[in-house]
Every structure is written in C-alpha cells, then in structure tokens.
Amino acid sequence: MVEPQILNSTVHHSGVFSIQMYTRKSAAFRNALKFNRPISQFLMCPDTQWAKVGGVQHDAASAHFFAAGASLARLDQLLRCPGGDISRAGIGSADVSRADGRAADASSPGKNFGEGGLEPVFAGALRQRLALRAATACAAIARLREDEGALRDAEHLAGFDAAPTPGGRLHRLWRLFTTPSVRLDARVVRVAADCLDLPPAIDCEAVAALVDERSTAENPLNAAARVSALALGVIGDAAQFDAEIFALWFADLVLARRLAWQAPLPLLATTITHPSMRTATGRRPRPSDADWDLSAARAMARAAQESYALATELSRRSNILLSVAPKLRAKKAARVVDLLLADDCVSPTRAATSAGLSDRATRRLFDRLMALGAVRELSGRANFRLYGL
C-alpha cells in the first residue's frame, strides 16, 4: 500500500490551508530524499478567536493568561512535528496549561519531540529570525541607533576579527539560543554576561544555581516571569538597560527548559516594546513591576502568535526551496540549502567558503534560486547582498 504524504498546500478564501497529497513513488518525494530532507509543509490555520484576548469571557487577568497558554500550546505542537508531519502534531507535547508544571520531562528534551527528536526543517531559520527581532527590540531598549538591517549586516558581513558593535553584541546574545547545547549553567551565563558587557564580578555559578532552583516552581509561564524578575535583582550592579535585557533573556531560557524544547525561542523580548504592551502610565513593562506576571503573559501571548505566523511563512518558503533544490546544477548546492534553512540569511562569501564554491558559482547559484522563487534578497542593495528564506 502506498503511503500518502503532505507536499503542498493552497489557501482558500476562508484562510485555511487545504492539503495536496502525493505518494512515496512520486518525483517530489524522491527529490526530497535526494537532499536528505524531510518534507516540511504544515497544515497551519490562523489563530482561532478563542485563543486571543477577548475571545472568551474571562476577567482581564485570566484572559491574558489563557491566551498565553493557548498560543504557547500551538507553538509547542509546531516544534514537535517530526519532519513537519502535522498528523503527529502534539504527540508528546508539553502541557502548558498544567498549574503544577510537571508536563514534560526536562531531563532529556529530545524524548519529548517527534521521531528521533526532530524539529521542523526550518527551525533554525525561525530561531535566527526571532533572534534578530529580539535584538532589534533590545537595541531600542538600550537606546541604540542600529535597526534590523544594521544588525543583520553587522552579523553577516563583518570580518571574523572585527570587534562587534554594541548592537551586534545584543544580536549575538539572542543567537545563543540557536544551538541545542545552550543550557542553564555558569558557562552560558558568563557568555551571555559578556555579550552585555556586564561587570566581571558577577558570580555566574551562583546566578545559575539560584535561577535553576527557582525555575522549577509554578507553571512554565509564571516560572519564566518570576525568574526574570529574580535575575534583575541579582545583577543590580549592572546598567539598568543591560540588566533588563538579561532578565528577558533568562525568561525565554527558563520557558524553553520547562517545556523541554530542544533550544529556546526568543519570544518575550520581541514584543515587550510593542505599543499595545504599555502600562496604564504609558511606559513599557519591566521585570521590576509588581504586575510583571500579567505583563509577561500579555507579551508572551502576542509573541507566540507572531512566531506561529512567521513559522507558517517559513514553512511555505522552505518547501519551495526543497522542491527546487534538485534543479540546481552546482555539485555542492545541498550545503547552501542547509545554510539557508538554518539561518536568517546567508552571504555569498559565507556560502562559497562553506560549500567550496567559487565566488562566480555562488552568485549564479543565488541568482538561480531567486529566479525560481526559492530565496529572497534581504538587503535591498546591488552589492554586499544577503539571501534568506
């Protein structure tokens, strides 16, 4: 019996994706196997009304916590789809609604994921793009002039021996989340502190131990909020902006640990500066606020919904990339495809070095990918271009 698989999708006027099926004997499936990549198309629908604030009849505080839990549950299921098979979405998922927080086994995050601990094929690009959003928001918090384009250029076009800019260090702080090896220990805390240029006298082992102890209490969402407030207090010698950014970084790290994700997603910092998050006094929420738990829930709900929307777009674009990959004549094009799926963007120089291609061959490869609609040029320049999904 031939087993059907999901390949492509179309959008009806209702906004819901319908599925086009293909079989394991089809050319599309053989092409995916040629590049050793699972098909990554999801059956994704817009956020349901009941999962948003005001969608159900609750008091104001309960509505925000409900929306945060529902949105994180959808995002959690997305990250647990083995190879993008939506039919297995949610199998082994963490239960973010449990008040006791004993939903997932955090001792071995891989066992809570899909077959082989796989994430969607575009998970790397998703984390990197969210890291750029978080860095842009944190640059605004720190009153830096670097925008998204400047941060992207600083990361992908600067030389290996070039000193990072203040905004570039913020970007690298959030890019720490893109490796599955990141965990809550003194070494990672020290690397994060160096990205923010925090005082060297900070006892990173004590900070990691204290946060580790407190992060196991309550449900995952409240634990993330409480730990971020705690982190703000234990590094009081640092500048206010740096301490606040450090606290937001800790919140995402704790949330991912409690939900047993393979690696954290930058979430809280991406929306905390949004105008809709402002308090009654007109300023942005801070971890030192008395109602920080509520503010964090509001920001996390919006961040999870926006991340799900971004994942929907990246899923579609990664599927296009994988479908056209067999048409590429360059012998080492598969390496460039891997780079595009794993990062926010790729420069031709990096692609040429990693894949062992000449500069001319790399430029022709990206021109071909653009002509096929598989990648976009993100810088808007004629020179020093950057390409991504």
Image: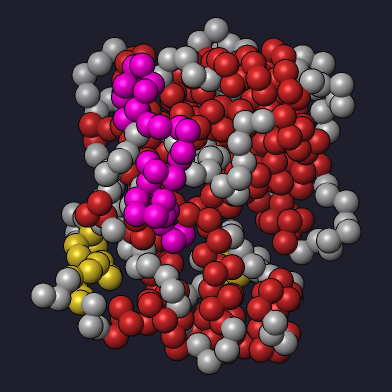
Residue drawn where x is 58% and y is 52% of the image: 128
Give the residues in magenta: 95-122
Q: Up-down: is 353 above or below 326?
A: above
Residue 205 image offset from top left, x and y in percent? 74, 23
The answer to whether residue 12 is left or right of residue 113 is: left
Is any part of residue 273 visible from this angle? no
Q: Nearer the viewer, residue 224 or 360?
A: 224
The answer to whether residue 55 is left or right of residue 194 is: left
Q: Up-down: is 72 above or below 379?
A: above
Q: Up-down: is 92 above or below 250?
A: below
Which residue extends farthest top?
290
Residue drawn where x is 57% and y is 89% of the image: 330
- Residue 222 on the magenta span: no
For the rendered model, the colour scheme is secondary structure
- Residue 98 on the magenta span: yes
Residue 250 image offset from top left, x and y in percent? 61, 28
